[in-house]
Image: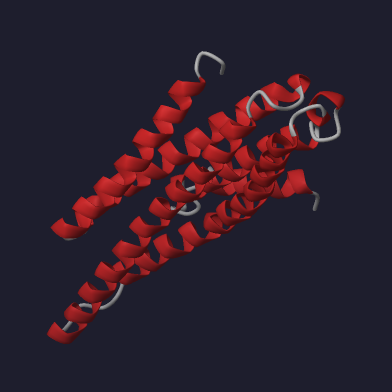
């Protein structure tokens, strides 16, 4: 099975009556693709005459961000499966027996624990994708002009990854304690605000 066959299999799995993989996993995949495209822009730039004419510190910073994007790409890819796994863990918690007071307490504790995990996962996704957005935005305008559209698509995908993960944070808040709700709301909204600022700063270039 080649790469496209595996990708098609994943897409068809999303397009099914199973709850996983869902919006969280797809957001992580989209972010990973965004990093890959930003790196493609970099690969097509570093040996070009225009890039080599830049100041050494500018080139070093460019390569540094390119290398960081590789780590972020891999982290986001790992979160594809992680997000599905923690959601499945929550679904399993809801299926636990509740025939006695003891079973009810065990089930309640497991649901609470799993609810935190399914909220942590997209928040982590937002944090990682945001770092990717920062790195990708720093490449803008320094590389191969003929590949600029690939970087722009990559930036848009990282933005989509952040916003998709944000929606997954929001939808899980109703199952959390009030103090946890405030924490996740504050953290996720801060990241979203900063991401929007980066995109706005790049416009109308994008």
Between residue 139 and residue 53, name the one nearer to us.
Answer: 53
Q: Residue 91 is drawn in which quadrant?
A: bottom left
User: Is 190 left, or right, of 15 in this rendering?
Assistant: left
Where in the figure is residue 38, as x and y percent of width and height? 66, 36
The residue under the point 34% across, 34% down is 193
Where in the figure is residue 24, as x and y percent of width and height? 45, 48
User: Is 186 left, or right, of 125 in this rendering?
Assistant: left
Between residue 22 and residue 170, name the one nearer to us.
Answer: 170
Where in the figure is residue 80, as x and y percent of width and height? 54, 54
Quarter of the image with the C terminus is top right
Callout count: 0
User: Is 131 left, or right, of 46 in this rendering?
Assistant: left
Q: Answer yes or no: is residue 171 visible.
A: no
Between residue 188 and residue 79, name the one nearer to us.
Answer: 188
Q: Residue 48 is drawn in which quadrant?
A: top right
Where in the figure is residue 92, as x and y percent of width and height? 37, 69
The residue under the point 43% across, 53% down is 19
Q: Residue 183 is drawn in which quadrant?
A: bottom left
The residue under the point 26% across, 78% down is 97
Q: Answer yes or no: is residue 5 visible.
A: yes
Q: In this rendering, is residue 201 above or below 192?
A: above
User: Is 67 left, or right, of 186 in this rendering?
Assistant: right
């Amino acid at each position: 099975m080649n790469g496209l066959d595996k990708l098609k299999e994943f897409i068809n799995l999303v397009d099914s009556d199973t709850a996983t993989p869902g919006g969280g996993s797809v957001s992580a995949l989209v972010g990973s693709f965004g990093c890959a495209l930003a790196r493609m822009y970099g690969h097509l730039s570093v040996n070009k005459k225009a890039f080599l004419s830049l100041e050494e510190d500018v080139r070093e910073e460019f390569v540094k961000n390119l290398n960081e994007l590789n780590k972020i790409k891999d982290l986001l890819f790992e979160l594809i499966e992680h997000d599905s796994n923690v959601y499945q863990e929550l679904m399993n918690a809801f299926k636990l027996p509740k025939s006695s007071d003891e079973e009810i307490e065990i089930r309640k504790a497991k649901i609470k624990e799993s609810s935190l995990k399914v909220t942590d996962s997209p928040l982590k996704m937002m944090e990682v994708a945001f770092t990717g957005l920062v790195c990708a935005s720093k490449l803008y305008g320094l590389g191969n002009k003929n590949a600029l559209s690939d970087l722009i698509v990559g930036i848009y995908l990282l933005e989509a990854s952040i916003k998709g993960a944000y929606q997954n944070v929001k939808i899980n808040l109703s199952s959390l304690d009030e103090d946890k709700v405030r924490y996740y709301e504050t953290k996720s909204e801060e990241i979203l605000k900063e991401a929007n600022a980066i995109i706005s700063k790049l416009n109308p270039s994008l």
